[in-house]
Amino acid sequence: MDLAFTKEEQAFREEVRSFFRDNVPPDTRRKLVEGRHLSKDEMVTWWRILNKKGWGTSHWPTQYGGTGWTSVQHYIFNEELQSYPAPQPLAFGVSMVGPVIYTFGNEEQKKKYLPRIANVDDWWCQGFSEPGSGSDLASLKTKAERKGDKWIINGQKTWTTLAQHADMIFCLCRTDNNAKKQMGISFIVFSMKSKGVTVRPIQTIDGGVEVNEVFFDDVEVPYENLIGEENKGWDYAKFLLGNERTGIARVGVSKERLRRIRELAGRVESGGKPIIQDAAFREKLAACEIELKALELTQLRVVADEGKHGKGKPNPASSVLKIKGSEIQQTTTELLMEVIGPFAAPFDVHGDDGSNERPDRAELLQQPQGLDLRRLQRDPAQHHRQGGAGTLGVIPGRDEVASPESIATIGSMDPGLALRAPRDDEARQFRVRGTKEHGF
Ligand SMILES: Cc1cc2nc3c(=O)[nH]c(=O)nc-3n(C[C@H](O)[C@H](O)[C@H](O)COP(=O)(O)OP(=O)(O)OC[C@H]3O[C@@H](n4cnc5c(N)ncnc54)[C@H](O)[C@@H]3O)c2cc1C
């Protein structure tokens, strides 16, 4: 396999890179670098910039607004997008339901939905999983009964990502109870504003409210909102999930994360020397880099083989990309936490943007000289003055988690005070209490 990019491909990479440099709103980029939440407005603004350039639905067929790029160009585009970083196009619309509609939908549905997906006029969410039907998705129970020219939908979905923002849902519904379970499911789309739809947030262990429960009580949906054929929804769902997996290795994200870990590990000190000089840490970092390189090569092989598996049939190796990509992201998160120590203890408030909070408070480490975390814990007031708002500490003898403000006050009264970083459960309790008492 020849892994060298051609001159044209390199020029394309430059074009993409300079477009991102000139067009990603700086605040949006900075928030992504710092692992902070983007608002719905910030995401939509960027996607519309991308769509105006003609790159918002790059992998769609050209007659529906795609770019006609080669697989390698797509690969380069995604890598640049993830490592710049710029927000990824909204997967639910562009990568999931869009391809299902242009592949299996009728002409009217294509005309109605595709341009709105491209311009994010509608925010879509995915209604597949149910309580008791996750891995065993084909056992799903949400029922759609045909009554004249309508479907009447009843049931419950769960883990529905960002449903609180959504205008539309694509939903797997049971339409035949007597057939083999995979053969009695239909793919139906409808408005989240329909009467009878209720969205209830699920708070995840990190305090985030990205996922939701969605309830349907006698929701009336026009019959024409069925995509493709009745009872063929399982085939469309498999097609959709194959597309999801191919794009989800997130190699660019992990590359950028490793670059950042290296940079910070060269500056943050532990035991009087930069963490990067610690042999055990270097070994873990190197192992992760090797895994990522192997994933990248596997992804390139999948890219090179595209089209060999038949129309609409994903390469089976794409499942490996999803699993390995997620494991590597977990490892990079752990490495980053190791480098930034107590800065990883989050206390942020979750606004209504619904994003999960990441343990990346590394932006707090922007001082020119190296930081000794142990010294910093001994001198919290100084740390606070240096812009370390956000760090929690446990007050010795009281076993109580202190806010940044209290740390600053206590630290100024007793500069020799040794605070320890809170354990996860302590930080979480503090956040819950703080949210209730102070509304932050
Ligand atoms: C952050 C997040 C966002 C999500 N967003 C969405 C969304 O927008 N829309 C949507 O529809 N879904 C969404 N999901 C749901 C996701 O697709 C499901 O979580 C997934 O399908 C697994 O189902 P489950 O959580 O019910 O786990 P389960 O199916 O209960 O599995 C639990 C464990 O048992 C194992 N297991 C299950 N069956 C077997 C078996 N037969 N043999 C051996 N081991 C088994 C699994 O590997 C797993 O470790 C989201 C999930 C998460 C975590």
Image: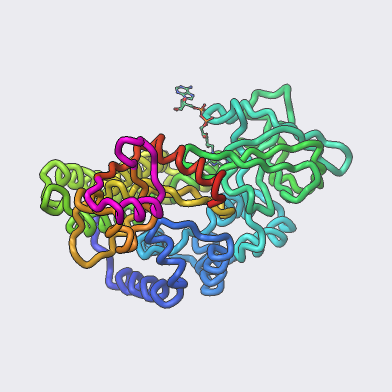
Q: Is residue 307 visible?
A: no
Q: Residue furthest right?
A: 148
Look at 40% across and 56% down and name the residue there.
35
Image height of 77 relative to 239, above or below:
below
Q: Residue 416 magenta-drawn?
A: yes
Magenta span of residues: 394-417
Q: Residue 378 magenta-drawn?
A: no
On the image, which quarter does residue 239 sit in? top right
Left or right of 374 in this view: 254: right
| Residue toward you, 358 or 380 | 380
| Residue toward you, 439 or 33 | 439
Image height of 27 relative to 147, above or below:
below
Left or right of 417 in this view: 431: right
Look at 73% across and 24% down and name the residue there.
177
Number of marks in the rendered image = 0
Q: Is residue 128 visible?
A: yes
Left or right of 71 in this view: 54: right
Look at the image and name its color scheme: rainbow
In the rendering, at what x and y percent does residue 277 appear? 11, 51
In the rendering, at what x and y percent does residue 220 appear? 82, 43
Look at 34% across and 48% down and name the residue there.
344
In the rendering, at what x and y percent does residue 338 appear? 25, 45
Left or right of 44 in this view: 282: left
Look at 27% across and 51% down and name the residue there.
414
| Residue toward you, 35 or 234 | 35
In the rendering, at what x and y percent does residue 195 appear? 81, 45
